[in-house]
Image (tube, rainbow, N blue to C red):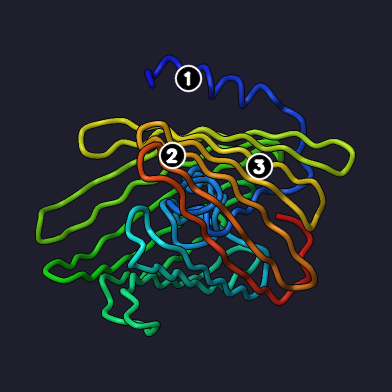
Amino acid sequence: MTPRVFAACVWGITALGTPASTESRVPFAGVYGGTAGAGSVLGWDRSVGENPAVLGRPGWSVAVAGYAPFGLADLRRVDASAAWDRERWGLSASYGGTFAPEAGRTGEVADAALGFQSAMKLRQGLTAGIAGLYQAAPGNSGAGISGGLLWRPRPWGGLGGFWSAEETRWGREARAGIGVDGGFGFSGMAVRLGAEALHGGARWETRFAAGLQLHALLSLYLGWDPPRRTAALGARFGIGGWEGYSAMRRHAALGGTSVQGIRWRDAPVAGP
């Protein structure tokens, strides 16, 4: 997708300009989640994602999800995270591991990653964050660091950006990304759209996300990643302090895979 087309998408999103009823939250938005990773630059995902400048509602939250990677039916992936958020700052930690089940039991760990994140509200509508990540796999391990900003001057939209650098035995990898989203609300429902551009490996990529809140306890999410030829659809539902998530991600050549997860927080569910 050319920069001109991406700019046109950004203009269309920011032109919405009507307040949405709530801020979007898409747990498990990562590469196997309900938006195929889209929205991560914009802080749609509370986990230690691409942009660490994310704060959740004040209180504790714990989340866990499981899925199978594309084309690797003999592997299973588990992602877990915990967060503690206050009004002006927050901390979170995450773990991700890929396992090879053997005879119904958990076998050898194929790879694992451990991440930590901290975010702080600099002023009203502006948040900054930093995160560290350590990954280990047979024959290769590495560590990385990332930083980011989220700016939401109005309830109906905002801007996000991040940078990251990772060092492994194969060399150093750097990535950066920017994103914009906008939304509107009506009759107790809300819609939010987002577009992101990422740069890494000497090329640009684009991703798009959409969220539809039908009720405070029910939301639907869509994601499209053109360079990777993937699309995703996810649903969020909840009651009390519990939330459940179910999503399907499909690749043009490798078929589909699903992710299921739950999240608990010490405050009643009020929206996505």
Going by the image, does 15 lie left or right of 198?
right
Looking at the rendered structure, which numbered label has been put on residue 211? Answer: 3
Task: Name the image quarter holding residue 135.
Answer: bottom left
Residue at 51 percent across and 56 percent down: it is: 258
Looking at the rendered structure, which numbered label has been put on residue 230? Answer: 2
Looking at the rendered structure, which numbered label has been put on residue 7? Answer: 1
Q: Is residue 265 above or below residue 205?
A: below
SS for tag 1? Answer: helix
Q: Residue furthest front?
A: 103
> Residue 237: percent from the left, percent from the top?
73, 60
Q: Decide which of 151, 9 is in the foreground and name it.
A: 9
> Residue 134: percent from the left, percent from the top?
28, 69
Q: Is residue 12 above or below residue 138?
A: above
> Residue 226: percent from the left, percent from the top?
41, 31
Residue at 51 percent across and 32 percent down: it is: 195
Q: Amino acid at mark 1?
A: Ala
Callout 2 touching callout 1 (CB < 8 Å): no
Residue at 71 percent across and 72 percent down: it is: 242
Residues at marks 2 and 1, CA–CA distance in whole angstroms: 22 Å
